[in-house]
Image: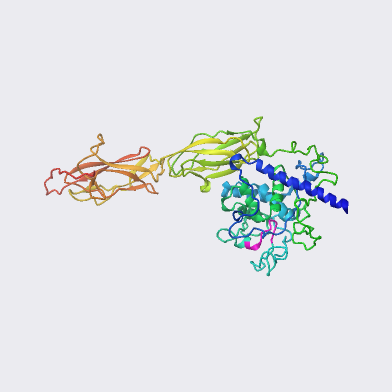
Amino acid sequence: MAAQFGRRLRRGAATTALAAAAIAALSASQAPSVIEGSHHGHTSDSIPDDDSSATGDSPYYTDLPPLNSPTAPPSVDHPPTAGGTEAGIPATLLDAYKKAEASLGRSQPGCNLRWELLAAIGKVESGQARGGQVDAQGTTLAPILGPVLDGHGFAAIRDTDGGRYDGDTVHDRAVGPMQFIPSTWARGGPNHQGWGADGNGDGKKDPNNIYDAALAAGHYLCASGRDLSQTGNLHAAILSYNRSQDYLSTVLSWYEYYRKGTHEVPNGSGAVPQDRSDGSTGTDPGSKDKTPAKPHKPGNDTGGSPPATHEPGDPDPGSSDPGDGSNSPQTPEETVTGIKNAGTGTLTAMAGDAFTERVKARTQDADGAAVSRVRVQFAIVGVTDASFEGGATTASVLTGTDGIATAPVLQAGDEVGDFTIRATVVGSTVPALDFDASVTARQADALARTSTDELVCKPGEQFEQAVEVKATYKGAVAPGVAATATLIKSADDPSTNVKGPYFKSDAGLTVRTLDDLKTDANGVLKLPTLYADDTTGTFLLRITTEGGAQLDVQLKVEADSATATPTATSSATAS
């Protein structure tokens, strides 16, 4: 018994050291400008306002990843190893995590959610759905239920779903591969519509389906506008899932482990953890098979743990790692030494239009080789209302095998001027790369009247028909285009005419030039009422727009044939 007790202590110390190392590695991988202090306990900012936690602080698996780093997928020449087995993620779950990341990358690009974080939580919550016990659609083959939350050793949560999700009409239980409690799933969230999501597009929100549960977990972690590339926000998000510092350490350990390399394994063949924070054993989180109660320690590691003779700091048997981490694989972010323009051209667009050019950045290592699978964040910097698709001002994109990340389409707003698109490698300290962009004023290249009727008026009266024109640009409607209307002396003399038709100011003064005009959403510009003084004849109203469109509109002031032609009279002019 003494030997077994000593072995548990040595294993506990080693894996606790691994958890601490994982936290340190994750913190060190953050760019200095975004590092925040780690959370040392639960704070109100850690938890969305409506729920105590996603899981009701239910028990979780405490097994930690092996000390040796993940290896390549097993092959004939390279048989499976402990690290390789633990690094394998069942195919359907891996697909669900990656699709949830992609979805959040579109809807909340500023969150910077990585699928490895979802995988880490899935490992700790349900052992990756008991090693991948899901069907082809991602639904668990059998329910995965946490213990009854009746207040005996756990939180006391009375039934909130009538047993719909957990089958219990008295108390709630955590449900599914990501272990959501029913109240969080169905009634949580900022609008109390539930965090539940439809990740597989089948029209249902099922916590027992990994596609639905992974997407819901992603939304939950990204709550309150969190940027998970920042250490403080990352820790707060994990603590919002389960308010335990040991839970935080365990999840971070798996997160760091998965970031260094994973591979796909068939459903049902994933490694299944054993030890749980409540002292239960077996593969069912809700199992009633309990060992004697013991305080939870993050070192309760089974699958892949080193033998009793392995001490903290010693080389892992069968590994070339000397124990100081110097030979452990680097994350892709750690290999990046620079970010370069990948062929982005001139970034210019007219107000309200989409930019035809997309920002492209390439990450590379010290040898100039492309670095794939790193996240590049594109941020709009400066005084502008331009945005990416969906109105976001930031977007994060993974680099491809060519090392290139292409930002979403950039949409110009109404603000005219210059601004910057800043590309930053998330988790790296390499300098950011800036791209200059500009928005020009809306333009029109053609104007035409919307009516062919003559504009005629008697002296001293007003024109019955208003002047209305339509602006177009390259044949398309031109909305929001600035325009000017001036009553000019002649086609050859554009100076302002002091006689003839005029507009009126709000104060009733004569005005013969109108500035600050704009076409409406249909490209139409309708001018105010025109009035005629006592001067008869034919006059010109010239309308010009931003972009050079111009139209001269003819105005006639004619007296009745029985009336003598009046003489010109002076008119009051606006000051």
| Residue at horizontal 63 percent and vertical 36 percent from the top | 403
Indicate how the structure is coloured in the image.
rainbow
Q: Position of residue 492 (x, y in %)?
A: 25, 34
Quadrant of the image for the N terminus? bottom right
Quarter assignment of residue 180: bottom right
Counting from the top left corner in percent of width and height, residue 545 is at 35, 40
* Magenta stretch prevailing secondary structure: loop
Give the residue at the far bottom of this rendering.
Answer: 170
Is residue 495 visible to the viewer in this orientation of the structure?
yes
Left or right of 188, for residue 574: left
Horizontal arrangement in the rendering, residue 568 relative to residue 376 (left or right)? left
Q: Which residues are magenta?
A: 174-183
As rendered, which of 441 and 461 lies closer to the eye?
Answer: 441
Is residue 107 on the magenta stretch? no
Quadrant into which the C terminus falls: top left
Is 305 situated left or right of 57 in this image? right
Whether residue 358 appears in this view of the structure is no
For the image, the number of numbered tags is 0
As drawn, the residue found furthest toward the top would be 367
Decide: is 170 above or below 523.
below
User: Image quadrant of residue 369?
Assistant: top right
- Specify the quadrant of the image occupied by residue 160: bottom right
Q: Is residue 284 left or right of residue 4?
A: left
Q: Position of residue 376 (x, y in %)?
A: 60, 40
Which x, y percent locates residue 236?
63, 51
**180 vs 155, nearest the viewer:** 155
